Image (cartoon, rainbow, N blue to C red):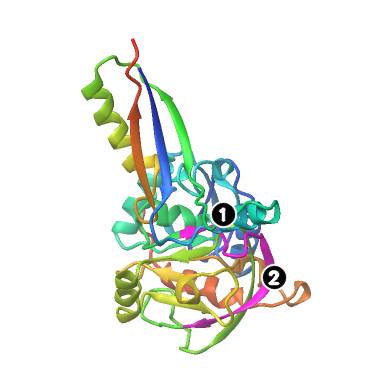
Amino acid sequence: MKATVLIRPKQGILDPQGEAVVEALQHLGFAVSGARVGRLVDIELDTEDAAEAQAALDRMSHELLANPLIESFAIQLEDGA
Amino acid sequence: MSDGPRIAVVTFPGSNDDGDAVLALELLGAEAVRVWHAETALPEGTAGVVLPGGFSYGDYLRCGAIARFAPVMEAVGTFAASGGPVLGICNGFQILCEAGLLPGVLRQNRQQQFVCADVTVTVESTTSAFAGTWEVGQELVIPIKHGEGNWYGDDALVAALEARGQVALRYLDDVNGSVGRIAGVTNEAGNVLGLMPHPEHAIEELLGPTGGVAVLEGLLGAARVPVVR
């Protein structure tokens, strides 16, 4: 089954990329005051068991995909099938 | 063959300062031994370990995030746990943080630019195994060259590190946004040191500043006894 993990810089953590994006958008004339840049990982798991997939995704997010000191993550399991 | 301590220099795919680290260590009298990341053990007689600079695994995901799972890292962790001195330089520092062997994490520079410059760092603490000849307040000029050297720890962590003398080196000027201008930290036991500046590039007058000598000699001083048998 398929899943997406969204990784974001935690609240209050400096995000230089986001700041650069805000400046660039303002240069283009958009009225924006904030942007945060994160990361998205689409994953195909070799299981059809939602609970098993959820547990695996949780572990892989903690161990590798996100650094809990500075990043938060959200897991989206694709329903489908 | 050198009589000096045997120092293992680990090469990950994408390391690029391993060669300079070997040269610098040998110039200072060590016996430098190259170790490939896929090895599962450190060479017999290893008394110190260097994780060099570079872009291990292309810096994919986060700097150091993938290298931390390299086969050799288990041996490095065991070596550190038994008190062996481990020095992480730049990418090596990032790997040690990701591996949990050092506190904090290195983020993208605040100025969004790669920075390459000779900088002055000051010795902040002499409690670690590396600080044999260091003096608090001593200034060392060493080059930096990184895009992700902006060290971060939350307020509680920084206060604890400062109180325990784990902040080893601090930039004289703010160069990348690092919290507390921290350039190098040690673990609580004082046998693992990570820093963003490159001591291996600062050991010969002919090539510029020589602030790296004190750091590498600190490693050699800490590496008097073989840990791996």
Residue holding disc 1? A32
Q: Secondary structure at mark 1?
A: loop
Image quadrant containing the N terminus of chain B = bottom right
Report if residue B114 is visible in the image: yes
Residue B91 at x, y percent in the picture: 54, 55
Instruction: Give the chain of mark 2.
Output: B
Q: Nearer the viewer, residue A26 or A15?
A: A26
* Majority secondary structure of magenta residues: strand
- Residue B213 as seen in the image, left or right of residue B71: right
Residue A74 at x, y percent in the picture: 34, 39
Instruction: Give the chain of mark 1.
Output: A
Q: Determine the residue positioned at 66% across, 54% down.
A: A24
Give the crowd class for mark 2: few <14, some 14-19, many >=20 residues within 10 Å: few
User: Mark 2, mark 1: which one is toward the viewer?
Assistant: 1
Amino acid carrying mark 2 in the image: Ala
Q: Determine the residue positioned at 57% across, 64% down.
A: B110
The image shows residue B120, relative to residue B55, as above or below, that is: below
Q: Nearer the viewer, residue A15 or B181?
A: A15
Residue A22 at x, y percent in the picture: 59, 55
Report if residue B50 is visible in the image: no
Residue holding disc 2? B117
The residue lying furthest to the top in this view is A81
- Please check the rendered image and state whether residue B98 is part of the magenta-colored stretch, yes or no: no
Instruction: Give the extent of the magenta segment.
Output: B106-123
| Discs 2 and 1 share one subunit | no
